[in-house]
Image: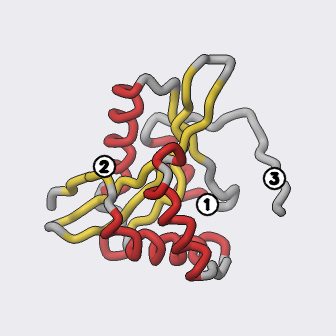
Amino acid sequence: MSIEIRIASRDDIAHIAQWNTAMAWETEQKALSPVVIGRGVTAVFDEPRRGFYLVAERAGEPVGCLLVTYEWSDWRAGDFWWIQSVYVVESARREGVFRSLYDDAKQRASQAGAVGLRLYVETENERAQRTYAGLGMERCHYFMYEAEF
């Protein structure tokens, strides 16, 4: 079945928030606040400088999404596009939905003059790591650190 990719609209906010909540639980057993995730997703639409969502549809039904955000690289004088908040509904997994989302994001990044695509993945999520490697992505030599407030 054909997968169509489109830029998300405000009509997709509820789906995206629901999918982010499911992804957080599936990958980290982390329960997200519906109020906070709703506000977070909506903020992307309120301020496009933050990024944009892509939505995958199968037979006209939304079945997955990803978020693209931007990171300026002074070393390369251009933006890296970060792929985040990837989710594919269970019934559509292993059907090329993520590949279609990734290909679309990659094409848009190239057309926009981005210097590359990046994403992060849980260290234990070997299936996702194999998927990303299969798309030609390479593991970086950076560790990620964070401080939450």
| Kind of residue at badge 1 | Asn
Q: Which amino acid is tagged 3?
A: Glu
Q: CA distance from mark 1 to mark 3?
A: 19 Å
Nearest-to-viewer mark from 2 and 1: 2
Q: Secondary structure at mark 1?
A: loop
Q: Residue at x 57, y 75 (%)?
A: 26
In x, y percent, where is residue 142? Answer: 75, 36
Q: Amino acid at mark 2?
A: Ser
Residue 115 against residue 51 in the figure, above or below: above
Mark toward the start of the polypeptide (1 vs 3): 1
Extreme residue toward the front, this view: 46
Q: CA distance from mark 2 to mark 1?
A: 20 Å
The reply to whether callout 1 and callout 3 are in contact (CB within 8 Å) is no
Task: Say above or below: 135 vs 66.
Answer: above
User: What kind of element bears circle 3?
Assistant: loop
Query: Considering only order in the chain, which callout, 2 or 3, is on the residue closer to the N terminus?
Result: 2
Q: As drawn, which residue projects farthest toward the top?
A: 76
46 up-or-down from 114: above or below: below
129 or 142, which is in the foreground?
142
> CA–CA distance between discs 3 and 2?
30 Å
Q: Give the image's coloring scheme.
A: secondary structure
Tell me which corner region of the image, top left, top right, bottom left or bottom right, holds residue 123: bottom right
> Which of 63 and 113 lies nearest the eye of the viewer?
113
Q: Residue at x 52, y 74 (%)?
A: 38
Q: Which residue is mark 1?
A: 125
Which residue does the numbered mark 3 point to in the structure image? 146
Residue linked to disc 2: 100
